Amino acid sequence: MKALIFAAGLGERMRPLTLHTPKPLLPVGGKPLIEWHLEKLAALGVDEVVVNTSWLAERFPATLGDGSRWGLRLRFSYEGAAPLETGGGMLNALALLQENADPQAPFLVANGDIWTDYDFARLPREFDGDAHLLLVDNPPQHPRGDFRLDADGRVGNDGEDKLTYAGIGLYRASLFADWRDALGDAAGTELAPPRFSVVPLLRRAAQRGRLHGSHHRGRWTDVGTPERLRELDATFVAD
């Protein structure tokens, strides 16, 4: 299995911390955020990880090297000065993710600016549909959540008891089938390469019954502000 780590964000809400360091390279618990993911991916048996980059892109290979210290092969998908957002970034990285792989094989995706105690090995090896999302309890900054999770593991768009997408999931390239028709004339789709969010495609998959998920009730943090970063880092001192 291959994996993609989103690391192309500008980190504007984290400044001045991100003026010289991309957010996924900020340290927490004694090592960069992204390194927590790389260790888990290596333990899972992933052998190749694509890291998409934009802001301060040169810092990633300089800090992480080629991935051999974790037994991984790291490849970098540079998006230019302006990030392509989640959908555009994933589409842009598909060629690397599918190189020498079954076109229908799922690949693991993780946001580079989250921390969790979730064991990636708990993700299903097999699943139906276009994607399997990890969902968490809604944090204070996102009280309404994103998706409904049914008892059978099916994920829906509507409902009062929604959960928040954790930024971790398994995806198939089939999610992007006819993506232009799904997005219409949304801003950014006319660019080359296109820039767009993956959320509309996930909602389409949910409508078609092709989106599944699971619920993680353990620790999870969206490291979106300096305050959250400090709070998370303090837990390691306490531990």
Image (cartoon, grey):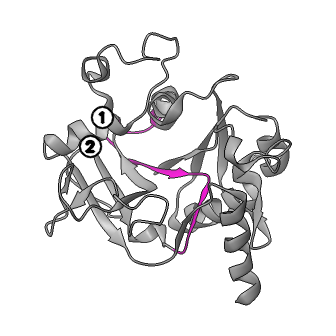
Between tags 1 and 2, which lies in front? 1
Please say if the residues under marks 1 and 2 sit with CB atoms less than 8 Å apart.
yes
> What number is the disc on residue 102?
none
Reading the chain from its start, which is encountered first: label 1 or label 2? 2
Looking at the image, which residue is at 18% across and 51% down?
Answer: 158
Q: Quadrant of the C terminus?
A: bottom right
Looking at the image, which residue is at 21% across and 48% down?
Answer: 157
The magenta span reads 98-117
**Picture coordinates of residue 185, whole percent (x, y):** 33, 13
Task: Quickly name the residue at label 2.
Answer: 130
Q: Secondary structure at mark 2?
A: loop
Using the numbered discs, state the Cα–Cα distance from disc 1 to disc 2 in whole angstroms: 10 Å
- The answer to whether residue 189 is above or below residue 92 is above
Foreground of the two, 226 or 73 = 226
User: Is residue 207 toward the left or the right of residue 58 in the image?
Assistant: left
Task: Quickly name the residue at label 1.
Answer: 201
